Structures are given as structure tokens and as C-alpha cells.
Image (cartoon, helix red, strand yellow):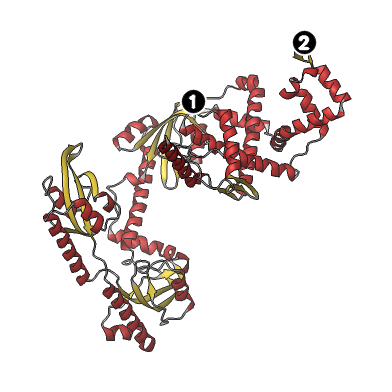
Amino acid sequence: MKRLILLALMLTGLLWAQNMDPKATLVRINEKTYTVAEYDKILTDYFKHYKPKTVEEEAKYNDQCFEELIGRYVYDKAIKAGKSKLTDAQVLAEAKRNVPAAVKGIPDLQTNGKFDKKKFEDALKTAPPFKKMVIEHVRGYYQYTKLLDDIKAEVEVDADSVKTQWIKDNDSLDASIIFFDYNRMHNVNASEEEARTFYAEHREEYRREDGRDLRYVKFSSAPSAADSLAAKAKADSVYEQLMAGADFAEMAANYSDDTSNAQSGGELGWFGKGRMVPPFEEAAFNTPVGSISRPAESGFGWHIIKVTGEREGTQGPEIEAAHILIRPFASKESLQALKANSAALHELAQEKGLIEAAESLGYELQTTPVFFAQDGFIPQIGRDSVLLNFAFKNPPNSLANIFFSPSGDAYVIETANEYPEWYPTFEEQKQSFIARATSAKRMYHTHQMAKNYLNNLEPSMYLAQAERDSLNIIEITDHHLDKPISMIGKIDELNQALFETAEGEFTGLVEHNNRWFLARINKRTRPDLTVWDKQKTQIIKEANDKYKQDHLNKWYLNERKQLNIIDNRADQYDLSSLRKAIRL
């Protein structure tokens, strides 16, 4: 018995240790704070009302309770600021319209056990203390209703706009749309000669002003040859220990550089061919189940693979495996050499300039492509605002401080040339120009095809010819004005043409951003204005209610956005599963 009591005391102490100090701040909404104890009491009462039955429901109602506290703060703040004003007369009128349940239960205000409204109103007239109590009680909750009603009253829907929208909502059609899409003309491509002509015709579009380039020497932080040999030696050593009987999972935990699975024994799960890099895949699928491969090199390093299972998957053979990855890392000596060599070059460049210094020390000097301040990026080097600013604030042949990239590479850099105006050469962006010329050529051929439909075919032949030409034919049903169309999107010109065309007819050729469309109206359903006349009062009321509610929601979200909210509930409650709050 004593042992059970002791265990209970220990458990109680553990629970207290896992929860926050009851006096600690759990929630803060601007200057309003709730301690752990205060919030827990509120939440306990909340749960008594809603009676959550599952862990998920507890988390849900916890969040709901939290949001209601925020809402109360927002409303109180608005009322205090005068957003809504409430007189005693208005409160009294509300009390008479909707008599509080607590008042109805007063025996002196009942006749034959039932609430007597006349006695209630007489008491309001003859008993000032009672009247004051009722006003204070009703004001406590009615002030919020009045605030929300006042905010909603700030807007009113326009009846004509409701009718216009109703007509749109009840005006629909079915159609077959022929989509002349130049992206589908894969057999049309620009030659290099055509691309050169395109470049000459559009050269001014590529003109840019105030460019720079840099000359530099890069000292790579990649592992040296000696570092790679050291990694291979380490991989061989690990393999030898495994062959001598070492536990694979323990070796993975101790030696693998794959942090995603080292502590789980290097487990990779099941995978089929095509999932891993080729050297890894080849070694893995050539290792029998229960065996360990010799170290296999990939771009990631050296892999030692243990195959633990094989099966036939839905797309071919699969194996289950684990691995130990030994990455080559730059050694301390390599990194020291990087710093020393870059510093030596930088020092000599200060004296002789980077071109002469690099030549005398035997380093390869490179030059960046031209770049511009608004790009925010230096090609071949990276994104660095300090270096970018240096390039545009200093004249040519200015030596920058040694630049270290996030990957650890060191750059000795000197400003090279200024370009008041700059055009790319054809060779510099050859593939880009060919791609643009190809797009332009496809657009032209697509447009000609669309015009040929109009000039050479009867409308009744359009759809059949589109099928023979392998064009996209998009079928739409119950389509409404201003709505997007699958595969096309929302195109105002097309929507307008659709709704201006009679049933059974084709639209004219519609162009939008070098895409062309022809559409046949298969069915048209027009709004019945007699229905509007019968239902307009209800329709306008519903639209007005929604408009007012949307206005209120927008106001609330804007007010909430401005609050400084601190939510530490996750330190006290498991909001995703088990509620672990102690009852204070």
C-alpha cells in the first residue's frame, strides 16, 4: 500500500513538472493576459458546456475557446472606442423584447407559476433598483449584439446590382470550344538562321543600361584529392569491420554521414529501379539479400549497402536496404590552404592588380557575365548585396575584400568593365533566341490555321476538322459569364463572345495573348425574369444579409490582424491529441 502511495506521489510530482507554473502567462492579447490557472478555469467551464467526447474534440474546443477570447477583446476594444453606442433606453427596450431567463424565473414576477410580463413591466416602473439591475444584466450581453448590428448597418446592398448578379447567375450555356494552341505545334521549329533574323528584328527589346562585370579567381572549398582518398580509406575501414562481424546498425549510427537515417540503422526502406542514383542502384541490385556491398562511389560519397529483402513491386523488382554513407569533407589542412592562398593572391593583387597577380601565381582568371543592379544577383558568384553594391560604386580595376560564399568558397574579385548600354550577342543567348523564334513561328502558323478555318471551311465543318488536326476541343456545360474555363482560364473576350452568340451558331475568331478560339454554342439557358419578380424580395434580403456579414467579417479580420497575440497553449496542452492540462 505504501509503495502505491509513493508511486502516486511521484506521478503527481512528474505531472506538475511537465506543466507550466499556474501563475505564468499562458495567453496574451495586447495588454490583456491570462495565466495558466485563469485560462484553465475558463477552458474547464467551456468543456462543461460543450462536453467534448474525444481528444480531437478537446483540441478543437480549446482553439474555439481561445478564438472567442480574442473576439471578446476585439469587441470590447471597439465598444470602448465608441464604435457602437448603447443607451439605457435601448437596453430596456431589448429587455422587454427578449426578457432574460433569469428574470422569468423570479417567483414575484409569475402568475400561477408562469411569467407575467405585466408584473415585470410594473416592477421596472416602480422598483428603480430592480430596473438598474436588469439594465446592467442585459447590457452585459446586448452591447455585443448592438455592436455587430451597427457594423453590419454601415453597408447596404444595391438592389440593381443584386438583380444584375442574379441574371448572370441564371444565364448559362453549353459550348464546344476549339482551342488553337501554338504550344501543340511541335513539328514547327525555327532554324538558327531564322533565330538570327528574329534577334536582329527584336534586338532593341534586349537593350539594358548600366551593366557591370567582374574578374575573379575562385578557391574551391570542395574536398581535395587527398580528402577524397581519406574518405575512401575510411569507407574501406568500416567495410572491413562489418566483414569482421560488426553490427551494421551500430556502425551506421557511429559512422554514417547521412543524418536522415544514421540513427535508425541507415534504413532506406523499399525502392525500385530508377529511384536512386545509378552507382548506388547498380551496387544495391547486385548485392544478394543478407549481404553487404563493397563501398560504391556516387556523387554523394561512398556507400556501403546492406540488402535486407527483395520483392516484386507494381513496377518491377524492389529491394529493401540500409546504407552507411561516408562523405569526403574538406580537411582542416585544405581549408587552411584555401584561406592562405586566397590571402596571398589578394595581397599581391593590391600591389599589381588581379590580372598580373593571378598570372604570376598561376591561377585561372575568370570573368562573370554582364549583370545589373536590379537583378540582385552576380552570375557565377551568387547573391550578396555588399558585393553587388561594391561593383556599382567603384570604378574598373577596384579590388574587393575577399568574398566567402555560403558554401565556403573564397573569391578574390576585381571590378572589370562598365557598360552604359548593353546588348547580348546572339551566341551568348543562342538557345534563348531559338526558343523565342520558335514560339513566334508557331504563333504565326497557328494564327494562319485559325484564319484558314474561317476562309476555307463551312462552320458545320469546324469541329470535325479540329479533330483531324488534333486540336484541343474543350466541352463546357452550365458555363456562366465571368467564370474561368478549364485549360483556358478566365478570358473576358471569349466569355463575351460566347454570351453574344445564338444557340447553334459559332462565335467569331477570338484572340487572347496569341491564343485563338472558335466556339459553337450547343445550348443556351436564359434567366426567367418572372422568377425574379416573384422571388426578388427574398433574393435581395439574402444578398443583403450576406453583404453585411462579409463586411463584418472583413472588419473583424482586420482588427484581429492588428493585435499582438502570444499563444503558449502548446506548452500546457497537447492541441493535436491528448489534453494534458492539470486541473488547478
In this view, the mark in front (1 or 2):
2
Q: Which x, y percent locates residue 55?
A: 46, 33
Which label's residue is closer to the chain start, 1 or 2?
A: 2
Q: Mark 1 Cα within 10 Å, few/some/many (few <14, many 20+)? A: many
Residue at point 18%, 64% (across, down): 234
Three-letter code for the amino acid on which mark 1 is drawn: Arg
Residue extending farthest bottom: 351
Q: Nearer the viewer, residue 298 or 101?
A: 101
| Above/below status of 213 relative to 523 | below
In the depicted structure, whether residue 30 falls above or below residue 398: above
Give the SS element for disc 2.
loop
Q: Which residue is labeled 2 in the image?
A: 112
Q: On the image, numbered disc 1 is attached to which residue?
A: 524
Left or right: 51 as drawn, with respect to 378? right
Mark 2, Cα crowd under 10 Å, few <14 / some 14-19 / many 20+, is few
Residue 508 versus residue 343 in the image, above or below: above
- Image coordinates for residue 428, horizontal then vertical, percent: 33, 67
**Residue 352: horizontal and vertical position, in percent?**
36, 88
Q: Which residue is drawn at 60% across and 20% down?
A: 531
Instruction: Name the quadrant of the C terminus.
Output: top right
Examine the rendering and report whether any part of residue 94 can be seen: yes
Judging depth in this view, the residue of 402 and 475 nearest the camera is 402
